[in-house]
Image (cartoon, rainbow, N blue to C red):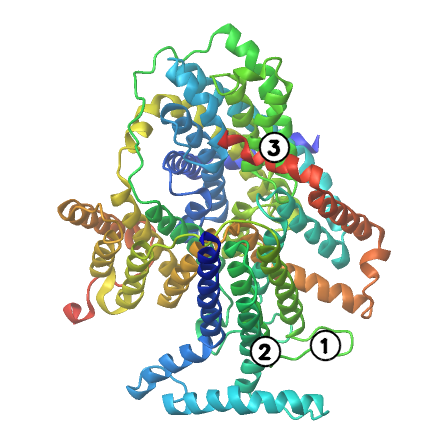
Amino acid sequence: MADTMGHSATATRNTSVALGFCLLAIAPQIFEFIWSIGTIFGWGVGRGPATVVISHATALLVGAPGALFGALGGDTKKASSDVMLALIYSYPLFAVAIVTVFMTIRSAQDYVGGVILMALALFALWASSDLQGMRGFSFGAGTAPRMFGGLLVALSAGIALTGLLAEGAALAHYSWRGPMFVMASILFFALAIRPLGLVVSAFVSFLIAALGSHETRWLEAAIVGACLTLGCALLFPYVLGLPMPMFPRFLIQ
Amino acid sequence: MELFANLAHGFVVAFSPINLLMCLIGALVGTLVGVLPGIGTIATVAMLLPITFGLPPVGALIMLAGIYYGAQYGGSTTSILVNIPGEATSVVTAIDGHQMAKQGRAGPALAIAAIGSFFAGCVATVLIAVLGAPLTKLALAFGPAEYFSLMVLGLIFAVVLAKGSVLKAIAMIVFGLLLSMVGSDIETGASRMAFNIPELADGLGFATVAMGVFGFAEIIRNLDAGAEMNRDLVQQKITGLMPTRKDLVDSTPPILRGTVLGSILGILPGGGAVIASFAAYTLEKKLAKNPSRFGRGAIEGVAAPESANNAAAQTSFIPLLTLGIPPNAVMALMVGAMTIHGIVPGPQVMQKQPDLVWGMIASMWIGNLMLIIINLPLVGIWVRLLRVPYRLMFPSIVIFCAIGIYSVNNAPVDVILAGVFGLVGYWLIKHDFEPAPLLLGMVLGPLMEENLRRALLISRGDWSVFLTRPLSAVLLAIAAGLLVLTVLPVLRAKRDEVFTESEN
């Protein structure tokens, strides 16, 4: 009884890990889609959302298989960047995801870590795929990145393999509160420093970061934040002579 | 004697008022960082890089060096008094040091730690001065093939001396190498993996990645750990600072052994202060007539690791100054600092910038002297600093880091990138990947690629050049041998033993 329960538990867990890998396999495409929504409002540059969806969908479903069989048939037509992404990045990860369903994961920490690292390496391989390779015996711009990218794919596959073969640690627990508020604070600072100046952005970022711990007491945090802001406002521009906007732009004008 | 003339010149440079001040600030900030847990040396050096912009290069490097060895002193203070190692290097000191404090012998423990550190610092300073010139000559005989092989050896050493899985450590190095490829290619100018983001055209900033992976990631991880650490353990009045005659006799051999071991491990690429302190403690325990005393307040357990970590912190400057190859992550950041000031680390530095090299070497001795004089009276203040709760400290560190990164290039994108690398670092920690080899790979990446390209261009594409040139072949053979030894089960157990010392 206990045995069957344990078995079904690992089975569901494996499926969710595999699903996670599938999501990882199309993560760059999703990222470009989210990015492209901004172009509607005129933020940033890039293709529109409709073009992105159609282009990636055709690349994933039609273009890449076509290129794959074309390559087997000796056809060396240059594939588009989207097709290359599907071929170099997404397909191998889909394959890993499918394999995952049938495997017993002994150490999720190693296995998942290895696969994600492999995803990074494959992505780097794709990103350097349009660069020039060897020219005679001299290195092209793309030679070294491809060399190290290939090496990292092999190494991360090795790590994932140890996760299948040797007992080890399970997946560590991730908390969301700390990372979220620290990241929010950093993002706010990055976006606010130019328009709002050091004083406002440092103080507000301090308070946002303080949210990352549930032990924060507000009055105390506000006082320390104010002191720190004052200290930094004196230290960086005056003592160290690093030019920096101090106050919000609309106040100065 | 050229050596004495050089050292004398160095002392003249180091004794100028501005450099003395920099040395003092560095030593004090280093001690502060060493005392405060949750903020490491690497993060601090990264954080203070932008601050050194406005300083003359000599002063800047003197200050950064002071932070590194100052942290070794500070770490021991809190280890002994409150059983909280402020730095990874003083984890083992806490075992016996805190026991001594509990027995009311905090004074002698602190004094021995300081004396050991000072002695080790003096020896290491002389060692740097002695080894500097000959190693530089050797380095000048190196061609691109030898340089490449030397860097491979260095990275392999980093793997061997890192804790945890060998495979993971190598993967981290290669990941670092790959990250260093982002940006413009040096030879062709082609933009590599930059995705048309203008801020990436120059490559990923080294300080940005270091701050993310070591600064932000560490903060997120500490928040993860949740509950405020119990900080107010023992704080009795420290009485009788002077160690007894027996203490001194007992601790002399460990200090000597620790200094030797630390100096060697510091020079080896990939080594550094952490492994030195662990190894020195293990050695003392092995040599002791009565090993059961260890963990119950043996003074040898304080003397040896403290001397070792300080010696290693200083001798790790040798490969950087002579060969231009940083042996560990902190030295990698020093490369960053030198590059900011337009100095290319390597054998030429010794000849072209004698002020810088000898001034820095001399300042280390002065800094050590300052530390031993100022530190003991300031112990009370350092301990009181521990009372600052983490809930106030971490937002301050976040903001300070953010402002620091922004000021490097006045680029908000850098701040976001550092945040992203903070998440990457958090992920690495969760999957038990060591971030230090990554940083090393990232610094050595451009150098390795350049030398590899050059070597192959000279040999007309013949890869065997790395094996036919004798020096290069020897270096590669050592690297291969080391890697094989590490994977062997017997030695692997030994290696794990060194690192698990603190847990039992």
Please, what is the three-letter code of the amino acid marked with disc 1?
Answer: Met
Q: Chain of mark 2?
A: A
Mark 3 sits on what residue? B7
Local SS, label 1 = loop
Against B27, residue B202 (above or below) is below
Residue found at the far front of this picture: A1
Please, what is the three-letter code of the amino acid marked with disc 3?
Answer: Leu
Task: For the C terminus of chain A, give its image quadrant.
Answer: bottom left
Relative to the observer, which residue lies in front, A181 or B167?
A: B167
Mark 1 sits on what residue? A134
Residue found at the far top of this picture: B245
Callout 3: 10 Å neighbours few (<14), some, many (20+)? many
Local SS, label 2 = helix
The mark lying in front, picked from 2 and 3, is 2
> In the image, B325: left or right of A109?
right
- Point 23% across, 54% down: residue: A211
